[in-house]
Image: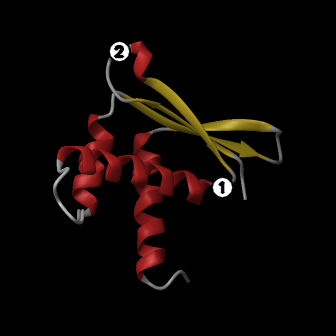
Amino acid sequence: MSHTILLLQSTSKLDSRTYSDYESVDECLDGICKVFEEHLKKRNPTSPSITYDISELFEFINEISDLSCLVFQKQTGQYKPHNKEWIKQEIFQLLRKQAAGGR
């Protein structure tokens, strides 16, 4: 488990900057998926359920003005930054693992 900080700026406006911290990278990635799901719920308020595929999630990530993760590195005692491409690769791996039954 590596403490992870999510930095998100949803629009070009500086006041849209937010951050969240998580106990692990996987929790952070789940948090990003939840942000997307909330976005979908706001766009479809009357829909009883929300479904999406990974390409829609990745398109959402690409459209976010700024998104990065800072992952704590125990060896150095520092946080390592990761960009959108890394985040998408990690989300893909996490969802693949979940689809396989969490193995």
Which quadrant of the structure image shows residue 93? Answer: bottom left
Which quadrant of the structure image shows residue 67? Answer: top left
Which quadrant of the structure image shows residue 51? Answer: bottom left
Element class at badge 2: loop
Residue that label 2 marks? 13
Seen at 24% across and 62% down, the residue is 50
Residue 88 left/right relative to 70: left
Seen at 43% across and 15% down, the residue is 15
Q: Nearer the viewer, residue 42 or 62?
A: 42
Residue 44 left/right relative to 27: left
Seen at 40% across and 54% down, the residue is 33
Residue 18 left/right relative to 84: right
Cα distance between the residues tagged 2 and 1: 28 Å
Residue that label 1 marks? 24
Q: Quadrant of the C terminus?
A: bottom right
Element class at badge 1: loop
Q: Quadrant of the N terminus?
A: bottom right
Is the residue under label 1 in contact with that under label 2 (CB below 8 Å)? no
Above or below — where is 3 with respect to 48? Answer: above
* Category of crowding for the residue at label 2, using alpha-carbon neighbours closer than 10 angstroms: few (below 14), some (14–19), many (at least 20): few
